[in-house]
C-alpha cells in the first residue's frame, strides 16, 4: 500500500469570486491538467461561466496528495457545499478583493465554522484596479467575529491571490511568482488526513456525493475515514437508523487531476469513488463488519419549490424533440434522481410528474439539460412548498442582500414590501444602499427580472434560503396580464407593431404562433386576446412599403429562467430543443371562460 500523505480541502466562496480559476491554476501548476482544461467541464457550466456541480480533483505537491473539492457558489446549490464540508479537513475561503465578503461568503463560512474547520482565507483578484485587499481582510475578520469564530479560527492565515494568473503571496509586497506560497500554507495548516492507527481499523467510508456512469450505474463519492477499501470487497451499508444491507464493491477509483483512476485499494484519509452499490445514498456508512456503527448522518436540505413536468401537449408538440412520451420523460427523470441529490420526484399521478427542487435555477438547469438531449416537456408554474408543524402552516423564507444606487432604493423597498419582504437592515456607502431583506420565497418568485428592470441593471441581488417560517397570507404580485394569441399562423410585423404599444412582446415577426400561446404581456391589467397574424388590410391600392420595413422594438426573448419566473398559474411553459414558449393551459378563449366558471 503506497502511503502518500493526504490533505483534503474544499474551495468555497460567493459566486464568481474565483474558486474554479484557483482550482484550475493549482492543477495546471502541479502538472495535473493541461493548460485550457477547466474544472467547469460541463457544457452548461462553460456557457454560463458558473459552477453547477461540485467536483473532485487532486494534485500532488512535494510528495503529498491534496484532494480538492471545487464547489458551486450559487445559492441554489448551497446544500451541496454543506455536504462537502462534512468530508474535508479545511477550506480555502476565497473572497473577491474588491467586493469583499458577500452573502454566500457568510453562509459557507458559517457552516465551516460550525463544523469546527479552521479556514484559510484567500483574498483573490488583487489585480483589479478597484481592489482593496486590506479593507477586505478587515471585513473578513469582522465576519469571522460576527459568526462566533473561536480564538483558533480567528487566527486564520491570509493569502493574497490572482487566481486568473496563478499567483499567490503571503504579503502584498511580495514578489508575484506562482501558487507555491498557497500550496505551502496548505501543507502547513491543513491537518493530515490519516494515521497508521486509522488505517489499521476496520473500513468506514461515507459518501458525500453521487455520480452516474452508463456502464457502472450509480457511483458513490466518499471519504474513507478508517481502514482500507479494496476492489471486490463485500461490505455492509448502514444508516444511522441501524438499518443495514449488504453489497459488493465492483470497481474503485481515486481522483488524479480531472481523471478518475481505477485502483485496487485505497486507504483511510483518501477520497474515492465506488461502484457496485446501486442504491447507495449520501450520508450512509459503508463498513466492513456488520457490527460497526454508522457515521453521523449528512443532512440534505429539503426542496423549497415544486412544479409539474408533463408531456408537451401544444399544437407544436413533436416538431423538434426526439423524446416526447411520458415514459421517456419518466425514465430521464429517474436517471436524474441517481445523481441530483436536492431533487425529489413524485411519479404517482398519471397526468404529470411532480418535481421538487431547491430553486428556480436548480430546476432550470435540469430542463436545459433535458432539452439539449432532445426532450420536449411542458411544465406548470413553480410553487413553493408549504409545511405543517404543530398545526401551523409554514413556508420557505429567503434572506436577500441587495445593493442598489441610493436613488433607487425607495422603489425597490416598496416593491419588496408588496411581496411581503421585511427590511432587516439598511446601510449606505459610496452612493450605494445595501439592504438586508427577509422575504417568503413565494414573494421572491418572479421578482428577479423586475429587479433588473427597476434598477436598470445596476443592482445586485443575492438570496439564500434561511428556513421555514409561518405563512404570511396571500401575496398579489402580478400587475401585468398576458397577451394571448387567438389565431394560429405566422406573426406579422404589422400586427406586432400595433400590439407592442400595449405591452412587451416575447416574439418577433415571422415566428409561428398558435391559438392560446402567450406572445407578450399587457402593461395594464388583465389578459388580452389578440391576433398577431393579421396583415395590413388589402386595398385596391398597393400598400406602401412591405411588412419587412416595419421597425419593431426587440422582443423580450423568453429564456427558461425568465419563462419560469413570469408564467402565471393558468399557463404552461413549453420547453423543446430549440424553443421556449409560454401558453395558456386552455388554448381557446371559450375553454378558458368555462374553466373560470369552474
Ligand atoms: N481580475 C481577476 N479576475 C479573476 C480572478 N480570478 C478569477 N477571475 C474571474 O472571475 C470570474 C469568475 O471566476 P470563477 O473561477 O469561475 O469563479 P467561481 O468562484 O468558480 O464561480 P462559481 O463557481 O460560479 O461560484 C471569471 O471571469 C474569472 O476570469 C483574478 O484573480 N483576477
Ligand atoms: Mg466555479
Image: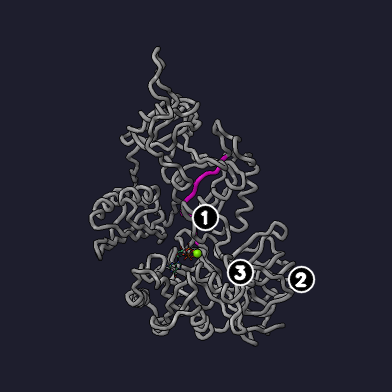
Compared to residue 491, the image places residue 55 above or below, namely: below
Q: Residues within 10 Å of mark 2 (few under 14, many from 20)?
A: some
Does residue 540 lie above or below 168 as drawn? above
Q: Is residue 490 magenta?
A: no
Q: Which residue lies most toward the top here? A: 540
Residue that carries the numbered disc 1 in the rendered image: 47
Residue 536: image x %, image y %?
40, 21
The magenta stretch is 301-310
Q: Secondary structure at mark 3?
A: loop
x then y, percent, for residue 402: 32, 59
The residue tagged with tag 2: helix, strand or loop? loop
- Residue 251 in percent (x, y) is at 73, 68
Considering only order in the chain, which callout, 2 or 3, is on the residue closer to the N terminus?
3
**Total numbered badges shown on the rendered structure:** 3
Q: Which mark is residue 34?
A: 3
Q: How is the image coloured?
A: one colour
Q: Is residue 544 visible?
A: yes
Q: Quadrant of residue 287?
A: bottom right
Could you tell me what secondary structure mostly forms the magenta stretch?
Answer: strand
Q: Which mark is residue 232?
A: 2
Q: Is residue 252 left or right of residue 434?
A: right
Could you tell me how far apart the alpha carbons at marks 1 and 3 are, in whole angstroms? 20 Å
Q: Residue at the spot x=33%, y=73% of the render? A: 132
- Label 3: few (<14), some or many (≥20) within 10 Å? some
Amino acid at each position: 500500500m503506497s502511503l502518500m500523505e493526504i490533505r483534503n480541502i474544499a474551495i468555497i466562496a460567493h459566486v464568481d469570486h474565483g474558486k474554479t480559476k484557483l482550482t484550475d491554476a493549482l492543477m495546471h501548476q502541479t502538472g495535473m491538467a493541461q493548460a485550457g482544461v477547466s474544472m467547469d467541464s460541463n457544457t452548461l457550466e462553460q456557457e454560463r461561466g458558473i459552477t453547477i456541480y461540485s467536483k473532485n480533483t487532486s494534485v500532488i505537491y512535494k510528495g503529498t496528495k491534496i484532494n480538492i473539492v471545487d464547489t458551486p457558489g450559487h445559492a441554489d446549490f448551497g446544500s451541496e457545499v454543506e455536504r462537502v464540508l462534512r468530508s474535508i479537513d479545511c477550506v480555502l475561503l476565497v473572497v473577491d478583493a474588491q467586493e469583499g465578503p458577500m452573502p454566500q461568503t457568510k453562509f459557507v463560512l458559517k457552516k465551516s465554522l460550525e463544523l469546527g474547520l479552521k479556514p484559510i482565507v484567500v483574498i483573490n483578484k488583487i489585480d483589479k484596479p478597484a481592489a482593496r485587499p486590506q479593507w477586505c481582510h478587515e471585513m473578513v475578520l469582522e465576519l469571522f467575529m460576527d459568526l462566533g469564530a473561536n480564538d483558533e479560527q480567528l487566527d486564520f492565515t491570509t493569502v493574497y491571490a490572482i487566481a486568473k494568473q496563478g499567483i499567490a503571496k503571503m504579503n502584498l509586497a511580495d514578489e508575484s511568482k506562482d501558487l507555491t506560497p498557497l500550496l505551502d500554507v496548505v501543507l502547513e495548516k491543513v491537518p493530515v488526513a490519516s494515521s497508521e492507527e486509522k488505517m489499521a481499523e476496520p473500513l468506514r467510508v461515507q459518501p458525500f456525493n453521487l455520480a452516474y456512469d452508463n456502464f457502472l450505474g450509480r457511483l458513490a463519492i466518499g471519504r474513507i475515514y478508517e481502514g482500507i477499501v479494496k476492489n471486490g470487497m463485500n461490505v455492509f451499508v448502514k444508516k444511522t437508523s441501524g438499518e443495514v444491507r449488504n453489497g459488493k464493491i465492483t470497481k474503485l477509483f481515486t481522483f488524479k487531476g480531472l481523471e478518475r483512476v481505477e485502483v485496487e485499494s485505497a486507504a483511510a484519509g483518501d477520497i474515492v469513488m465506488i461502484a457496485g452499490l446501486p442504491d447507495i445514498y449520501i450520508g450512509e456508512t459503508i463498513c466492513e463488519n456488520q457490527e460497526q456503527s454508522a457515521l453521523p448522518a449528512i443532512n440534505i436540505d429539503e426542496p423549497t419549490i415544486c412544479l409539474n413536468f408533463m408531456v408537451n401537449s401544444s399544437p407544436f408538440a413533436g416538431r423538434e424533440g426526439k423524446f416526447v412520451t411520458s415514459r421517456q420523460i419518466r425514465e430521464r427523470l429517474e436517471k436524474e434522481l441517481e445523481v441530483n441529490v436536492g431533487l425529489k420526484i413524485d411519479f404517482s399521478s398519471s397526468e404529470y410528474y411532480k418535481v421538487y427542487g431547491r430553486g428556480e435555477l436548480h430546476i432550470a438547469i435540469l430542463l436545459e439539460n433535458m432539452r439539449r438531449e432532445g426532450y420536449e416537456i411542458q411544465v406548470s408554474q413553480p410553487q413553493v412548498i408549504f409545511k405543517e408543524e404543530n398545526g401551523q402552516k409554514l413556508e420557505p423564507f429567503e434572506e436577500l442582500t441587495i445593493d442598489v444606487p441610493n436613488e433607487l432604493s425607495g422603489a425597490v423597498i416598496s416593491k419588496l414590501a408588496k411581496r411581503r419582504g421585511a427590511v432587516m437592515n439598511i446601510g449606505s456607502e459610496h452612493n450605494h444602499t445595501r439592504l438586508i431583506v427577509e422575504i417568503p420565497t413565494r414573494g421572491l418568485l418572479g421578482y428577479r427580472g423586475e429587479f433588473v428592470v427597476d434598477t436598470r441593471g445596476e443592482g445586485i441581488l443575492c438570496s439564500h434560503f434561511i428556513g421555514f417560517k409561518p405563512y404570511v397570507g396571500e401575496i398579489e404580485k402580478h400587475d401585468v396580464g398576458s397577451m394571448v394569441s387567438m389565431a394560429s399562423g405566422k406573426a406579422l410585423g404589422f400586427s406586432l407593431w400595433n400590439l407592442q404599444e400595449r405591452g412587451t412582446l416575447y416574439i418577433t415577426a415571422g415566428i409561428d404562433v398558435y391559438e392560446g400561446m402567450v406572445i407578450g404581456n399587457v402593461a395594464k391589467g388583465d389578459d388580452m386576446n389578440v391576433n398577431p397574424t393579421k396583415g395590413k388590410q388589402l386595398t385596391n391600392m398597393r400598400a406602401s412599403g412591405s411588412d419587412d420595413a416595419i421597425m419593431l422594438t426587440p422582443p423580450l426573448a423568453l429564456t427558461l429562467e425568465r419563462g419560469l419566473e413570469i408564467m402565471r398559474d393558468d399557463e404552461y411553459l413549453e420547453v423543446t430543443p430549440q424553443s421556449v414558449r409560454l401558453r395558456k393551459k386552455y388554448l381557446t378563449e371559450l375553454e378558458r371562460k368555462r374553466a373560470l366558471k369552474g
